Image (cartoon, coloured by chain):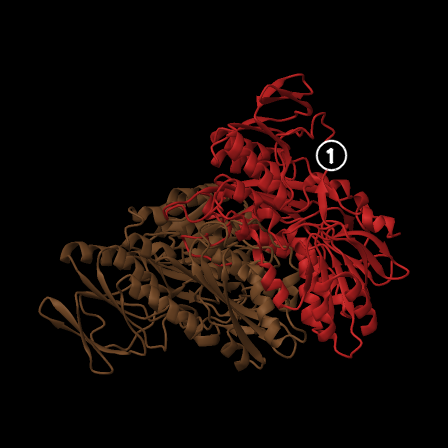
Chain colours: A brown, B red
Amino acid sequence: MMSVLGICSEVFSEHSNHFRFVHWASEFSIMHLVVIGGSDAGIAAALRAREIDPNTMVTVLLADGFPNYSICGLPFFLSREVSDPAALAHRTREELESTGIELLINTTAKAIGQTDKTVVVVGHRGHQRSIQYDRLIIATGARPTDPGIIGHTLPGVFYLHTMEDSLAIDRFVAETKARRAFIVGGGYIGLEMADALTLRGIEVTLASKTESVLPSVDPELGRSVEEELRRHGVIVHTQTTVRSISPSGSTLNVMDAKNRHHTTDMVVLATGVRPSSELARSAGIQPGHAGAIRVNRRMETNITDIFAAGDCVETWHRLLARSVYRPLGTTAHKQGRIAGENAVGGNCEFAGTLGTQVVKVFELAIARTGLSEVEANHDGWQAATVKSTMWDHKVYYPGAMPMHICVVGDRSTGQLLGAQMIGYWKSEVAKRIDIIATALFHGMTVDGVNDLDLSYTPPLSSPWDPVQIAAQAWLHQYGNQPASADSEART
Amino acid sequence: MMSVLGICSEVFSEHSNHFRFVHWASEFSIMHLVVIGGSDAGIAAALRAREIDPNTMVTVLLADGFPNYSICGLPFFLSREVSDPAALAHRTREELESTGIELLINTTAKAIGQTDKTVVVVGHRGHQRSIQYDRLIIATGARPTDPGIIGHTLPGVFYLHTMEDSLAIDRFVAETKARRAFIVGGGYIGLEMADALTLRGIEVTLASKTESVLPSVDPELGRSVEEELRRHGVIVHTQTTVRSISPSGSTLNVMDAKNRHHTTDMVVLATGVRPSSELARSAGIQPGHAGAIRVNRRMETNITDIFAAGDCVETWHRLLARSVYRPLGTTAHKQGRIAGENAVGGNCEFAGTLGTQVVKVFELAIARTGLSEVEANHDGWQAATVKSTMWDHKVYYPGAMPMHICVVGDRSTGQLLGAQMIGYWKSEVAKRIDIIATALFHGMTVDGVNDLDLSYTPPLSSPWDPVQIAAQAWLHQYGNQPASADSEART
């Protein structure tokens, strides 16, 4: 707990916005929770702390001017499916402040003093000051990896990670009337950008260094995504590493490792992210997997009263039973909520990620949860994958679309380990992967999936849901007993 | 096991189709499994038995000429969304027979001799004979309840339970050019028929004796369904019991209990079903709940070597931990599979129903799983329901539609007991109820739903899926701690 005097002296000396909190603090000794970062994890933590203990004073430090933005929404602004970027905010600044959170925008944390419990910050006018905390939550997120490409800082070369990145791309397209874009990276962001810029009327070339795009799913599914990209005019190069970007008149010249040249008007680098954990490290906070901040499942760092959450931390994997680096918005929200609750005296644990993800690429949705065969075998399972193809609903009802489901299970125990799905984006692929994610959460066997009482009506499913038909196909190959042929939705 | 001689004598004396099985049986002593009923449960059982033990001889007795038809698809044939009724078959007769199943169509089982292990059957030419079995599976299904309405056998008054019913309605509409239909019953079939006949261009009036239509969900949701019906021109009368139907020239006169008269061209009675268990009862098989055949979770009746499955049996409810009568196609498939497996020496148990259901009514999907508050409190829980309204995906992405989710939980333990959902039929309502069904299967708490790692992309969900936002809303009212306000998908 900090004394009110402590707040006062800091407030009056540094930041007038702080003033109203003095009244609010009254003469009581109150806890001050400082949150570094105002994106998913930071805001989730702040909101949860205020809810659990409305007497806690919560200050959120935000490096830019866009609190609580949906980073996942940026491609849809660039595609013009969303016309107003302000719509991408989960909440407005006013909504956040109405919950009693103090929001310090354009305020960057520069150092953490763990012994005197202070955060040194620099405001938007360059003023430096220090803020005292009783509890601290670090939610500094991630930032794009340096792809090691010569010329990656040239004008016309962009990342897509912040609202400012997004606005910069938008301005560039509008001002230069860019007609061609070259995207480096075939992961989620690269694919969403290929979709978005194509919708925007730009000719897109996409280069992925992996065997197939979307390396988080098996190559066979990745190749289906490539087909979808090509069907919409995207030029796709796989197993292609970009070496350099150089200016060539008003265009850019992209050279790959095979010495092929690609002329383009702009480049988007989408080669992944790494944790923004330098601030934490310089404060003596222990790093963990992939340089992310090490936390336990209560989201505590190794330093008393300092928690961390979101894309800057390592994440407990529920199946692997160890920490990995798997930055995801959904995980950031959950971890933030837990850090916020525990920071004000709660006692909850992060249940673990399963790496559940879905992405929409043009008309397709591609989803995964749990482990791939390769990932599982790497950790000692005897995993096998079976791919099934079936209709999303009874084929006699109009509009049936094919979907593909890969089920991964352990051959020796029958344990369900993961699934991957690809189908029409309105085929309930996203929530079908969630059925598997919920089954995985509880350690079900592949056979157990058949016991689930799932909903059915001919326009929306079949008496055995596609996830059950896929489980039966796996059992047919790897179960101890043959699987049921009662999978009438196949035909 | 029966001797080959036993088969031979029976075959040659009674039924030439049987002949080929004699060759197949060769000189081995083989098991003969007889299945009474060729709909979902019967066919699932027959297929599973053949798969588990390809040496078993399987004979399926089918009272009509339509094996393995999708009863749930009948409304879509009447609506003309499905043009060819043959498309409603899960499999053709040829496909079934290619698995080695002997299919005796237009063959009605008249008596079961449990001591001599025979079934007396009457074929389509009225020939009576008896078939010996080693194991018997009764899958005689259900049939419509007698609604106790005077005039219910008049021409122009129909049930919708079999393919023959469906063809009869279709012929009647085509021949009489019926313009008006009166539907009695506001359950799943009544609603689907209201939708189907409206699409067919018929003016529909629907009468439900309950407070609101679709009594399997809470009245508030039922009223939303009524709005959808009215929006499409259906006249809806709730709390209305029909007393009599009488001919009036070329039309029918429907009189309700309030002495109101309704003139119509045809009447569809959709007032529920009851188990077809008379055959079993007359063989000394013990009845259970609601007159259905009593079975254990291995689908065994009280008589050795006689199993039963599907709409003719009582069903183990996973939450109530007792048997109920809850006839559903999904359950019939599961129970049939289990009966088939156990009949040939397997050892599996039915995991229990959660009453998971979904129905599409015009543009809406309405789904439920688990218990309603009333049902739960009747069985001793301290249940409470919280209704939430949210968008099906991030509202900034085009096409967001509102959905409503009712979460039912136990106030004293926090146990999740059930959920009901209503939303646009393409809003993944069906598979979202399945997330809850999978959570219920594992006895999760409402709070636990927040730990699930569910998929997210802005066009398809929000960082907390609607089911999690709904769980948080329940916790906010009834949890020990306030729920998170981090439910940005609400706005």
Q: Residue furthest left?
A: A249
- Which quadrant of the structure image shows residue B44? bottom right
Residue B458 locus on image (x, y percent): 41, 53
Residue B253 locus on image (x, y percent): 62, 20
Say which amino acid is labelled 1: Asp
In the displayed structure, A40 sits above or below B469; it is below
Point 74% across, 42% down: residue:
B274
Q: Confirm whether residue B1 shows in the render.
A: no
Q: Secondary structure at mark 1?
A: loop
- Left or right: residue B326 versus residue B431 is right
Residue A285 locus on image (x, y percent): 47, 72
Q: Confirm whether residue A426 shows in the render.
A: yes
**Of B132 and B469, the residue lying toward us:** B132
- Left or right: residue A278 versus residue B408 is left
**Of B230 and A198, the residue lying toward us:** B230
Q: Chain of mark 1?
A: B
Residue placed under numbered mark 1 in the picture: B146
- Which quadrant of the structure image shows residue B440? bottom right
In the displayed structure, A364 sits above or below B188; it is below
Q: Residue furthest top?
A: B259
Point 40% across, 47% down: residue:
A18
Point 32% across, 57% down: residue:
A75
The N terminus of chain B - image quarter: bottom right
